[in-house]
Image (cartoon, coloured by chain):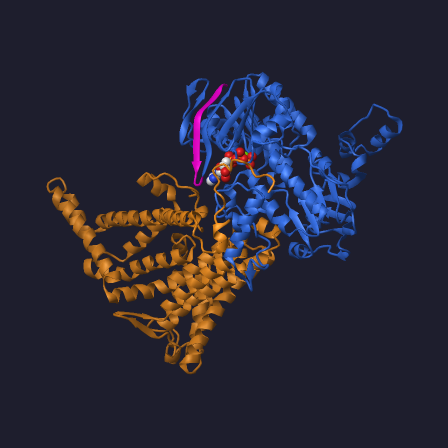
Amino acid sequence: MKVELRGITKRFPGVVACKGVDLTVESGEVHALLGENGAGKSTLMNILFGLYRADEGEVCLDGEPFDCRSPAQAIAAGIGMVHQHFMLVPVFTVAENVMLGVEPTGPLGRLDRVEARRRVEELSDRYGLAVDPDAVIEDLPVGVQQRVEILKALYRDARCLILDEPTAVLTPHEIDELMAIIRQLADGGRSVIFISHKLREALGIADRITVLRGGEVVGHTTPAETDEQALAAMMVGRDVQLVVDKAPARPGEPVLEVDGLVVSDDRGHRAVDGVSLTVRAGEILAIAGVQGNGQSELVEAICGLRPVDAGAVRLDGRDVTGHDPRAMFRAGLAHVPEDRQRDGLIGSLPVADNLVLNQLDRRPFSRRSVINRREVRRHAARLVEEFDVRTPSIDTPVGNLSGGNQQKVIIAREFFHADRLLVLSQPTRGLDVGSIQYIHRQIVAKRDEGVAVLLNSSELDEVLALADRIAVVYRGRVVGVLDREEANRERLGLLMAGAVEEAAAVEATGEEEVTVT
Amino acid sequence: MTTATEQPPAAPPPAGGDGGDAGAGTGGGRGRAVVARLADLGNALVIPVLALVTALVVGGLVMVFTDPETLDEWGSFLSDPLGALEASWDLVSESYEALWRSSVGTPRGIGRTLVEATPLALAGLSVAFAFRAGLFNIGAAGQLIIGATCAGWVGFTWDLPAPIHLPLAVVAGFLGGAAWGGIAGVLKARTGAHEVITTIMLNYISYRLLDYALRSDAFQPPGRDDLISKPVRESARLPEVSLGEVTVHAGVFVALAAAVAVWWLLERTTTGFRLRAVGANPDAARYAGMSVPAMYALAMVVAGGLAGLAGTSNILGRPSFSLTGGYYSFIGFDAIAVALLGRANPAGVLVSAFLFGALRSGSTGMQAATSTPVDIIVVIQALIILFVAAPALVRSIYRIKAGRGTAQTFTASWGS
Ligand SMILES: Nc1ncnc2c1ncn2[C@@H]1O[C@H](COP(=O)(O)OP(=O)(O)OP(=O)(O)O)[C@@H](O)[C@H]1O
Ligand SMILES: [Mg+2]
């Protein structure tokens, strides 16, 4: 389907999110839409999908003007969207979520669950998504939830598929698979609009690329004409250095010691199975692993958010096993959680309040329980400026910010009080290259100040860029701890896939044949 | 700053960044913030005001079609159409005029309205406070009864000089309600029992407890065996206060003070911030080191105390000064409506309590003057709530575009 957006303008209070944007996507084309955080990408797509109405401009589908007033109309017209933030009913099963709105019915309108399940299973198999149709959404890790969203759009047989940062939560292997699916869809005559902050992906999959900045189109290009460096410069409007400079670490005394930790997941299964780790002052230890191998549970247990079944956590030599989050905070822990909207922010409260969420009872933000609004606002204004959070004002509800800017709010808050231990879960998920560069520098700066950093990232590039040491986890166990110099993508990939002995074997004999299960 | 981009897209430098540092707030940012606030306020008022207007119009129609004489006129509509319209207009305008006169049209009316509004405001604050912490307090009725019972018992049992007796009775009323609300709060915090269920059950228990108490010697006046208590002694009664020609009891000021206190607690203290954070997103609150169960318990204690004060202001302030069976428990339910209309915000609660108080105090005058039954008031109240709870309905009637952030759902339209 050919999709044309002409002169689209959308204003929000205090911001013009899109200014006269033109975008044409031919059928059979994969079109990458790039831009900084807050550039207006999601807003533009939400207009196409009927979630917002444009203040000006028009949409044409296959040359016909299309006045889209609701997602239902958009879906009927053949537009499918996978949102940046999931739109799933948490208490429903995968199959129920996928069929929601287009339920197959038998005679007399009876809901045909068997048929729905069958189709979900079939799609899931066909595209290698490996989701259990009967699993309940709220029990699934973020990564799998994302795959359900993709499944949902595929199920509706969309002729134009919008993917808003679909790969942010996928593993490298899954991304390759998704790319294959996208190609397959495009070759079948569908158009695909693909939003991503990972330039390499955009270059790899797109037929054409459009870059937005500040709500305006700043250029069109094709992968043949450009490269990562040039794209980054186009997005940000200046040269971006894609790798961080960092001096060798000078590790000091152990700050965090984890000893034989055993932790269960929500269903009572053993998710962390005897993990021992040490993070020293002034070093970055990265936990690498395919999502769902116990990293989330490990981090939650360390932060006092999940009960510990066995083992110990020590902070600065003090036993803090089973402390609550407040006690951990006092002991010197700063934590950037994985699911920012659920755990990191209070969407309905202003940016300023979210920036002091866990520090409000400290001076100077309050004194004997009475809040000092002026200090809170001054602090907020400073952090917003320092971390370049794009927001109309510090009184804007944080939920109205673009995804990347929400993340910056959390980063700003936690970095402000991180002085002993900083635990980061997917700290740059959904951020643009400029912001990633900035945050990576800040992480290194924290390390150089002598803070112990525990980095949980499923992004191999990020792990390789930042880590001083890398602990690879597989099925709840640490299967190897590598120094940065010993690590490379291949070796990590093998370890992450659980190929412990094989990896060793490859090293020993240089043999080529490796079976990864 | 390293990532300073050349083009801050439409994002003005954060208000208060430079200019605000001096605290003087002379910059345009402050001015714009004020305008934005006023716009917000306007937005927030549109729906309640239109809901009120619509409810009055529909209420008028109900009056017309339930009044036998006017209906007769409509029976001969074809022969005398003007007569029917005139009769209807007369009925509705006279009824509303009488309602106006006896509620806010005279000093006496205003006094009565304020007295009616007082317990509504206190109980409304109770519901609103719990709501801000994410809890539905359906138990204001029970908390009000327990509060009134405790305050009343102190009021008629003990014999103390007024400067000690009155404060003691008020404190007893607050504590009684707080304890009753606290039961639901602790159950929620400890076991996760849903507060809607527990507060409803506690309501029933409170009615029976009151009945039981009213049959005991400790409560019953000698020589009576109906459900009534001894009257509160003079020394524990809320004094009458006259402002010009308007006479009210001092409970009115208790309600005003409570509204200010609730606002201050919610907006200006760390405890209030935690309550609101827990109410808006318990997961994030927990990650930020707040104790969610403790906040639930606290919210219900304070909410219970406020509802207790509602009962207290009645028993210590309203002539008769005696407890009766089911003592004013309906206020606990009207309070839910008051909180809803007031958008769970203290100032809003005061305004909507005044409105409901006016409808209540004016209704008897209206019935006396025009024979329009007082029940019409209940209809109007119900209609107001219906329209406030379904903003989409009001918007479609008046063809207003959905404003920013005005969520369509019932719960989301609560709170700020
Ligand atoms: N509902 C809303 N109310 C007010 N402002 C909004 C709303 N949605 C988006 N904005 C603003 O519009 C601008 C564009 O946001 P949008 O979400 O489209 O950015 P984006 O390009 O998708 O960024 P990201 O890469 O971070 O997801 C931002 O400045 C954002 O704060
Ligand atoms: Mg976005």
Q: From the top left corner, tell me how far across and down residue A481 is, in percent.
A: 80, 40
- Residue segment shown in magenta: A1-14
Q: Quadrant of ligand 2?
A: top right
Question: With B247 as the anchor, is A289 left or right in this view?
Answer: right
Single out the residue that lies furthest toward the left: B79
**Residue B260 placed where, x, y %?**
42, 63
Front residue of B110 and A131: B110
> Residue A59's x, y, as percent?
44, 24
Measured along the vertical axis of the image, is residue B175 above or below residue A396?
A: below
User: Looking at the image, is A282 positioned above or below residue A47?
Assistant: below
Determine the main secondary structure of the stretch shown in magenta: strand
Q: Quadrant of the C terminus of chain A?
A: top right
What residue is shown at x 80% (from left), y 32% (from top)? A499
Q: Is residue B326 visible?
A: no
Q: Is A423 left or right of B392, judged from the image as shown?
A: right
Q: Indicate the position of residue B412 as horizontal and vertical percent values.
A: 45, 46
Q: Which shade is chain B?
A: orange
Closer to the camera in the image, A329 or A170: A329
Between residues B389 and A286, which one lies in front from this camera angle? Answer: A286
Letter of the blue chain:
A
Quadrant of the rendered structure where residue B391 is? top left
Residue A515 seen anywhere in this rendered image of the structure: yes
Queried whether the magenta region covers residue A10, the answer comes back as: yes
Residue B246 found in image quarter: bottom left
Is A104 inside the magenta-drawn segment?
Answer: no
